[in-house]
């Protein structure tokens, strides 16, 4: 298929829009759905201060089929302990309704550092690889993430996981 390219204007400057998102917008409209959530997603995405994170998030979206919320965030997955603590340090609460934050500078933004610091999220395809040795008691949660807060999409596992500085537990 030929690439679909629409420009987007940000702060008065026109930029080409990634094929991944234009295909989703065209598909939604052709199926009779409102594309406003994707437009809101783009507004949030271009609020991300890192061009690298923006480019990597397009790779994540292309590799996954995760829902976009009406306010332009996306829903992903996260594994936590049976006590809703993070599975890496056992110190960070991830209870339903919590918003978990850490300083953006403390999240590893290096794509090739595949296991590193940050608040983790993933697609459904990565769930089998995400977790601790206590997979029989770990919990799988849905998380809501603003694309402006995504810091890195690691290069392994077909771009199926990511790191962010803010996540809302659902």
Image (tube, helix red, strand yellow):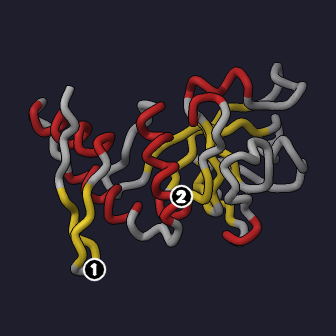
Residue found at the very far front of the displayed protein:
2
Residue nearest the viewer, comparing 56 with 167:
56
Residue holding disc 2: 53
Residue 27 located left or right of residue 92: left
Find residue 126 and report its horizontal and vertical position in percent.
63, 27
Residue drawn at x 56%, y 27% is 124
Residue drawn at x 67%, y 69% is 104
Dot 1 or dot 2, earlier in sequence: 1
Secondary element at tag 2: helix
Are there few (<14), some (14-19), or many (20+) residues within 10 Å of tag 2?
A: many
For the N terminus, the image quarter is: top left
Secondary element at tag 1: loop
Find residue 75 and report its horizontal and vertical position in percent.
48, 43
Residue 99 seen anywhere in this rendered image of the structure: no
Residue nearest the viewer, comparing 130 with 92:
130
Callout 1 touching callout 2 (CB < 8 Å): no
Residue 33 located left or right of residue 161: left
Q: Residue 140's quadrant in the figure?
A: top right
Residue holding disc 1: 11
Residue 54 seen anywhere in this rendered image of the structure: yes
Find residue 147 and report its horizontal and vertical position in percent.
47, 57
């Amino acid at each position: 298929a030929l690439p679909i390219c629409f420009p987007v204007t940000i702060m008065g400057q026109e930029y080409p829009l990634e094929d991944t998102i234009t295909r989703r917008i065209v598909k939604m409209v052709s199926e009779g759905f409102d594309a406003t959530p994707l437009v809101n997603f783009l507004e949030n995405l271009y609020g991300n201060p890192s061009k690298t994170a923006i480019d990597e998030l397009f790779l994540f979206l292309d590799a996954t089929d995760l829902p976009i919320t009406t306010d332009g965030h996306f829903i992903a997955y996260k594994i936590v302990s049976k006590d809703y603590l993070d599975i890496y340090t056992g110190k960070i609460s991830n209870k339903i309704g919590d918003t978990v934050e850490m300083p953006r500078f403390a999240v590893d933004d290096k794509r090739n550092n595949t296991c590193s610091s940050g608040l983790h999220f993933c697609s459904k395809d990565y769930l089998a690889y995400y977790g601790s040795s206590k997979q029989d008691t770990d919990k799988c949660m849905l998380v809501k993430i603003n694309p402006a807060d995504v810091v890195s999409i690691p290069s392994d596992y077909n771009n199926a996981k990511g790191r962010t500085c803010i996540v809302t537990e659902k």
